[in-house]
Image (spheres, rainbow, N blue to C red):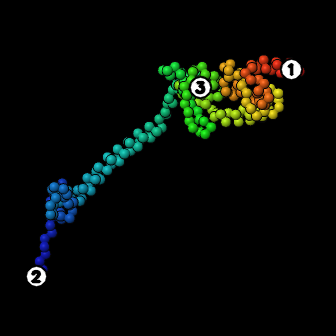
Amino acid sequence: MDVTEPLETKPCAVCKEIKPITQFLRRTGKRSSMGSRRGACRACRKAKTAAVMPADAQLQDQKAMRRRAQANKPRLSPPMPSIPLPNDPAALKTTRQGTIWMRGKTDKGRRWYQEIELELAVTLVKEHAAVIVNRHTIRRLFSNKDFRRYILERDNHICYFCGEFGDTIDHMLPRAKGGHTTPVNCVCACNACNQSKADQDLQVFMKYEEDRP
């Protein structure tokens, strides 16, 4: 005589139908035990998921529409600040110590910093020897070797005073009288003219050269 064991069943908490225990999910956590199952059957869970999905899809569509609207919204460009041009000397302002920071590089590439007067900083910027980094700082454009090579190549190694071959640099306004080492104030010169001019003004030296027999 065959004895058939009855199937384990459980009433569904939603539809109240008695269904096999396999239609229910196992419990986990503190409420779990041997054979413990959740209250809703598989069919009721599917029906609940199907009812919730359209609402979620509608919410996702609304979020997508808001994102597209934000992306297509024209962006207003920020107002441009009224700051002078980068190399306008009027943009320079002294620090609390009343000076301007000047920085540069040596011939070997080592960085250096120095405090200078505002008047000197303005002159260096105007005569194309430095550029403005910020309102308190300027940067030298050339190291010593780079500046010498730049002047000689710019003037094609031709002496500014006599037109002969030149391989030295001379200040048209001597440094002893307030001249600076800038592209505007420096020219190529031969060794003889450089020695003869010394610390004379340009006009005095040129007149002397013209009057010399």
Front residue of 183/145: it is 145
Residue 83 visible (yes or no): no
Q: Nearer the viewer, mark 3 or mark 1?
A: 1
Image spot of residue 88 (x, y percent): 60, 23
Q: What residue is disc 1 on?
A: 212
Front residue of 180/153: it is 180
Amino acid type, callout 2: Met
Q: Which mark is residue 1?
A: 2
Q: Residue at x 20, y 60 (%)?
A: 26
Q: Are marks 3 and 1 in contact (CB under 8 Å)?
A: no
**The image quarter in which residue 32 lies:** bottom left
Task: Rate crowding at label 3 as few (under 14), some (14 to 19) or many (20 or more) other CA atoms within 10 Å.
Answer: few
Q: Nearer the viewer, mark 2 or mark 3?
A: 3
Amino acid type, callout 1: Arg
Q: What residue is disc 3 on?
A: 85
Q: Residue at x 34, y 44 (%)?
A: 59
Image spot of residue 211 (x, y percent): 86, 18
Residue 11 visible (yes or no): yes
Front residue of 8/109: it is 109
Report, in whole angstroms, how far the alpha carbon at label 3 lies from the one at label 1: 47 Å
Report, in whole angstroms, how far the alpha carbon at label 1 lies from the one at label 2: 146 Å
Image spot of residue 39 (x, y percent): 17, 56
The answer to whether residue 120 is left or right of residue 44 is: right
Report, in whole angstroms, how far the alpha carbon at label 2 lies from the one at label 3: 106 Å
